[in-house]
Image (cartoon, grey):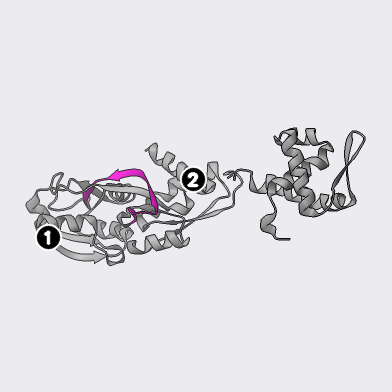
Amino acid sequence: MNIAAVDLNLLVAFHAMLEHRNVTRAGEAIGLSQPAMSSAVRRLRLLLEDPLFIRAGLEMKPTPRALQLSPAIRQVVQTVHSEILQPTRFEARTSTRTFTVLMPDIGEANFLPRILAMLAQEAPHLNLRTLAMPRHAAAESLESGAADMAMGYFPDLHKAGFYQQQLMRSSHVSLVRKNHPSIGEHMSLDQFIAASHVVVKPHGREHVFEKHLLQQGITRRVVLEISNFLSLLPIIESSDLIATVPQDLADFCVQHGQVRTVSTPVKAPVIDVQLHWHQRLQKDPGHAWLRSAIHRLFSKT
């Protein structure tokens, strides 16, 4: 027998006949009229080459062949109902799922404590794994499943096949040590240009602010380039260097070190901090729950 010839609806009709032993009642149970149910029984008889159900008084009694098939058909119908047709659920409080998130080092320091505190309350058994990689590799990681989402500034992911959700916007400010000898509460453009600067270039890439300065034709003396945002704090604390960074990074440094912020005399671009994910996970219940929980967390700040 060719399995392509088997109509799943016929198995449902067979199961209903086993349960009710009456064509009319079996049809009512699965939403078929009496003629439609009779037609289904005829098709079953042709398909399985057996009468299957024989009238005996007020009942349609199953034949030996029908009884032989009944355990397998019951199992198929029950499996379809319980495993295939049931909507997928995600129970946050009991899930032990692990999510992999692309995130820069400053995101780990600044965002993870809040996210972990939230998960401890709402999803205590859920696990997170973070990865840092070049921006150009993010799309491939999300497409392949190596990562489940990206959190931060990933402009390369604004393309077909990916979704975005805004978390926050971050402007740029300059960061100096508290007792800087020449930078007070305000900084002029001449002071900014004359000062010695440290620049962060994760994975060697040019940062948004650096590109903006080039477009404005503004040059300054960069005496140090580093690849890690978290290295900034001890460098700024122990030198007269200036770093111009996103506000969220500056806030983190001020909270944890002997540094302060100064308004940047150059109108700087605003960075959109977003969640990004591949379209294959758009309808995944667990992924949707985590996205919603993170967005809700950032909406409170």
Q: Position of residue 124 (x, y in %)?
A: 57, 46
Q: Quadrant of the C terminus?
A: top left
Whether residue 299 is visible: yes
Image coordinates for residue 75, horizontal then vertical, percent: 76, 50
Is 55 drawn above or below residue 97 in the view shown? above
Q: With 70 as the anchor, is 202 left or right in this view? A: left
Give the CA separation, mark 1 to mark 2.
Answer: 45 Å
Disc 1 + disc 2, Cβ < 8 Å: no
Q: Which of the 4 image quadrants contains residue 15? A: top right
Residue 159 part of the magenta segment: yes
Q: Is residue 78 visible?
A: no
The amino acid on which the numbered mark 2 sits, given as a three-letter code, is: Ala
Based on the picture, tell me whether residue 169 belongs to the magenta stretch: yes
Q: Residues within 10 Å of mark 2 (few under 14, many from 20)?
A: few
Which residue appears at 7% of the width and 53% of the height?
190
Mark sitting on residue 220: 1
Against 16, is 133 above or below?
Answer: below
Choose the circle earlier in sequence order: 1 or 2.
1
Name which residue lies at 12% across and 53% down: 192
Q: Nearer the viewer, residue 38 or 220?
A: 38
The residue that label 2 is drawn on is 288
**Residue at 13% in and 56% down:** 215
Residue 221 in the image, given as x and y percentages of width and height: 13, 62
Magenta stretch mostly in which secondary structure?
Answer: strand
Give the structural element (helix, strand or loop) at label 1.
Answer: loop
- Extreme residue in the right direction: 57
Name the side, left or right, on which 124 lies relative to 69: left
Give the residue drawn at x 45%, y 58%: 130
Q: Return the residue found at the far left.
A: 190
Stretch in magenta: 157-175
For the N terminus, which image quadrant? bottom right
Q: Nearer the viewer, residue 179 or 142?
A: 142
